[in-house]
Amino acid sequence: MNSRNSNRTRRLERRLGDRMRAHLPLALSEFIMFTLKQGWAAIFGILLLGGLIVTGWIWQPDWALARYDALLIYALALQALLLATGMESWREVRVILLFHLTGTAMEIFKVQAGSWGYPGGGAIKLYDVPLFSGFMYAAVGSYMARVIRLFDMRFAPYPPFRATVLMAVAIYGNFYAHHFLPDIRMGLFAATVLLFARTRIWFRIGERSYWMPLPVAAFLSSFFLWLAGNIGTSTKTWLYNGQASGEWVSLAKMGSWYLLLYVSFVTVTLVFREALSPTATPARQMQNARQ
């Protein structure tokens, strides 16, 4: 997002926030603004889920264009629109591309391993994986990049960066290795808490600063990704091994999403290193970063 669009967004946020605070209790108005900004940060993912729902309702198997191919065209059009309108920058697109590549690689492996599958047909597939699937991971990357910018987020005190990268590599590797070797996810759960126990996500709503423990934010985010996963399976976009159509996704999948979020977060920090601070971040630092 260029500075002109960024300033326009902040002016709109300030006007809307001032109006709400003038007519609503402070706690309620701040919660509404928080929710609206979260929705705006997740706009790519929300629109992508909307595409899954609508195509799941209307698509017919005898149509000339397969549903998965239409979803790929739709996802590419969404990405182009966000770039053209300045809602995403080329810097953020680099993050999204990383998510797309690593996500597609995981999809290919997991589908071949039988963890889940895509029951529909499509011309644009790679090893039985429709290429639009990488955009589901890219939506997570888009959200993380946008939420950091929209909330002026800072992560502090942040653990040694090299340790976080090693942990992310171990988590990503375990998604593959547990098919052949002992599953170490319980140790990885413990590692996320031990490494990030003191890390707070500092963010702004209007002129006020707030914070949340990073592991708590990861847990809450994993719940919403679990809900998104249920939308995907309910629209028969994909189905997990042994899952019947219409059956809810196991809550155990939240654990997988929780771990994957740390991989996603560390991937984003490869580009947004300025948001990390080894010491606690006071409100003054956030104000300086905002200016």
Image: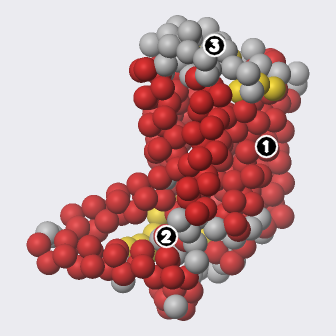
For the point 59% across and 32% down, which residue is it? Answer: 71
Looking at the rendered structure, the secondary structure element under dot 2 is helix
Tell whether 285 sits left or right of 35.
Answer: right
- Marks 3 and 2 sit apart, C-alpha to C-alpha, by 37 Å
Rendered position, 34 above or below 67: below
The colour mode here is secondary structure
For the point 75% across and 52% down, which residue is it? Answer: 97
Looking at the rendered structure, the secondary structure element under dot 3 is loop
> Residue farthest to the left?
23
Q: Earlier in the sequence, mark 1 or mark 3?
A: 1
Q: Residue 58 versus residue 261: which sits nearer the camera?
A: 58
Percent x, y for residue 16?
Answer: 26, 73
- Marks 1 and 3 sit apart, C-alpha to C-alpha, by 22 Å
Query: Mark 2 — residue?
Result: 150
Tell whether 198 sits left or right of 247.
Answer: right
Percent x, y for residue 104?
Answer: 76, 36
Query: Mark 1 — residue?
Result: 102
Q: Quadrant of residue 94?
A: bottom right
Badge 3 amino acid: Pro
Percent x, y for residue 19?
Answer: 19, 76
- Marks 2 and 1 sit apart, C-alpha to C-alpha, by 25 Å
Q: Dot 3: within a 10 Å radius of its alpha carbon, few (fewer than 14), some, or many (20 or more) residues? A: few
Percent x, y for residue 27?
Answer: 23, 67
Image quarter of the N terminus: bottom right
Badge 1 amino acid: Thr
Residue 74: which numbered mark, if any? none
Badge 2 amino acid: Leu
Query: Mark 3 — residue?
Result: 119
Q: Residue 8 versus residue 73: which sits nearer the camera?
A: 73
Q: Residue 18 versus residue 120: which sits nearer the camera?
A: 120
Q: Residue 281 versus residue 206: which sits nearer the camera?
A: 206
> Residue farthest to the right?
180
